[in-house]
Image: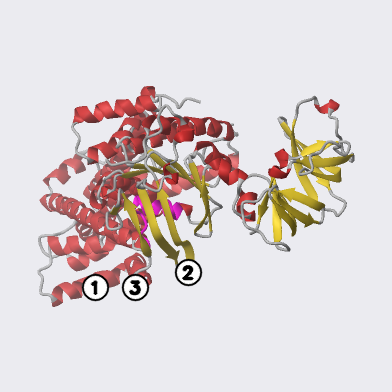
Amino acid sequence: MHKRASLFCLASLGFGLAFLYLPMVILVIYSFNASRLVTVWGGWSTRWYAELLRDEAMLDAAWTSLRVALLSAGAATVLGTLAALALTRIGRFRGRLPFSAMVYAPLVMPEVITGLSLLLLFVAADIDRGFWTLSVAHTTLTMCFVTIIVQASLIGFDGSLEEAAMDLGCPPLRTFLTVTLPLIAPALASGFMLAFALSLDDLVIASFTSGPGATTLPIQIYSQVRLGVKPEINAICTIMIAVVAAAVIAASLIAKWRDLRSAGTGLPAA
Amino acid sequence: MDMTSGRRGDAGRRQFAPWADPAAQPLVRFERVAKRFSGHVALDDLSLDIFEGEFFALLGPSGCGKTTLLRLLAGFETADSGRVLLDGQDISPVPPYRRPVNMMFQSYALFPHLTVAGNIAFGLKQDGLSKSEISVRVAEMLALVRLEALAARKPHQLSGGQRQRVALARSLAKHPRVLLLDEPLAALDQKLRQDTRFELKELQARLGLTFVIVTHDQEEAMTVADRIGVMDQGRLVQVAPPAEIYEQPLNRWVAGFIGDVNLFEGKVALQDVDGVAVDSAAGRLRAFSTDKVTMGDTVWIAVRPERIRLVPARPGDAAPTGNAIAGRVADIGYLGGVSVYQVALPDGTKVKATLASTTRLTERPIGLDDEVWLNWPADAGRVLVR
């Protein structure tokens, strides 16, 4: 049943989309601006993209960000999943409530505090700040998001599936790997992607915990912007938007393709 | 294996009664098992023997402990006390994945990420069978439940009845010593459920396996089982073949739980070779008794509605041991094949009588508000002392 969209609905949709995407659209358009002045339109050009390829510092920062995001998202997915398992599977253990509260704390903690406390820890432990401290810090930041997503899928998980696997002769660990894990994989994947995006995005914690030689893209952009917005920045931001959009579109296409494939063998007999 | 009792052969069902043979070794033995869940008693000092090749039904209201007993055998619960023996071996310390027992779950618990064939092969893969052995066995199982054409489907592409058959095939694939069925037909609709009952019974007889089914549906238990264990509050109230449970219930609770029953309370007035005479509010009633009763005891006479005959006039030729009481038809429930008559006695109690609809509804000889006589032979009534 199709209801005609009312004018009000269309207007809200338009306003909402504009609110979300207008800034980005302007940024993308200006990344192709030929003029050196950010606010003056000087015709179409891709010179800032070419310029960007020659900017070693920016490329290094992008590479660092990517590595940190991959590593910390991977670690956060493993740790977050383990925490989610502990919270959902081990009934009522001593200290369950404080534990769950502590897992969620970084969610509401101001990032400045998380960053500062991590900085103090690394200084006290006499660890040189750099790539590894940054990865650890981002794992700390993003783990709780993974926990929340995985926990939600574990709560909805039919426990009799695991019992059925064990009943058919499958030991507990193998049951987890062959039955539980494939079924909660979508939650793990979205947890990983969220953690990846958060890490790529983070400026505050990175500025506390990174050191020389481990400058991330947001830090690099931020420090350049302080000297004035260069058109190059628009170009790198456009690339980031493109990468994120591509990842999101790919993920939804994969999900859709999987649905189509599993439904492809025909409809159930009535 | 050393079995003194043979499997059900050409001699037919009637001959299969290993529980009556004192020398027979049980396949499964629950020995004084007890289980509590945070104060709630699920199993209360329960003992039970189940024999090779038997189709045993655990029947009882929800929360009576029947599922706990099944899960104890599967290994998903451990008893607080008592032992569970399989082939004479205590299996209490054996984890579920090493027990030669398989279970069909109420929710079917089919793996949604695997195909029908993948689901059936799952247990065989755990045993480390070769690829060719697995594919042979999977094909066998698919043929058994007539799902050959759907081997490549995923569970969500199947109807409820098809899923039920996949679950059955998966649990049978490993040839378990005992197959446990937890409310296997509860999710099916009425018509399909009735057909599937007979299929299940036929399958069990053909494979000669031991089935233990948990159900709250008495009709289901009566249809499929060799013996029924009626459970209430963690105890087995009566364990007997279906006909015996129905015709000789041990007490009022079993009589009321299995089928419909009319109960007449009274005091024992007479006991002789023909049975017992009881003085009830409806007059003196004669019934059959296997229990020892003494004069003056309060007892109940249980009469099944289908054993009561409705006649318009006092039955003159009633045998001296028969019963005849007068009443008035208060209500008639027309169920198609049978009609249920509610007859009010002078003291206000209502008696149910079921009559097969042998005539058209409009030609029914007895109608609403008619004065009628209820008539049943003495051996249709059974004296219950509890």
Q: Are marks 2 and 3 on the same chain?
A: no
Reading the image, the residue beneath label 1 is: A116
In this view, B17 is above or below A173 = above
- Quadrant in which the N terminus of chain A is drawn: top right
Q: Is residue B76 magenta?
A: yes
Q: Nearer the viewer, residue A172 or A62?
A: A172
Q: CA distance from mark 1 to mark 2?
A: 50 Å
Reading the image, the residue beneath label 3 is: A95
Chain on which label 2 sits:
B
Give the percent coordinates (x, y) of residue B121.
28, 34
Q: Nearer the viewer, residue B320 or A189?
A: B320
Q: Residues within 10 Å of mark 1 (few under 14, many from 20)?
A: some
Name the amino acid, label 2: Gly
Check contact, mark 2 vs mark 3: CB within 8 A.
no
From the viewer's perspective, tell me whether residue A98 is left or right of residue A232: right
Name the amino acid, label 3: Gly
From the viewer's perspective, tell me whether residue B47 is left or right of residue B194: left
Which residue is located at x 71 percent, y 30 percent? Answer: B337
Q: Is residue B136 magenta?
A: no
In this view, B12 is above or below A167 = above
User: Mark 3 falls on what kind of element?
Assistant: loop
Q: Nearer the viewer, mark 2 or mark 3?
A: 2
User: Mark 1 falls on what kind of element?
Assistant: helix
Give the percent coordinates (x, y) of residue B287.
71, 48
Chain on which label 1 sits:
A
In this view, B205 is above or below A221 = above
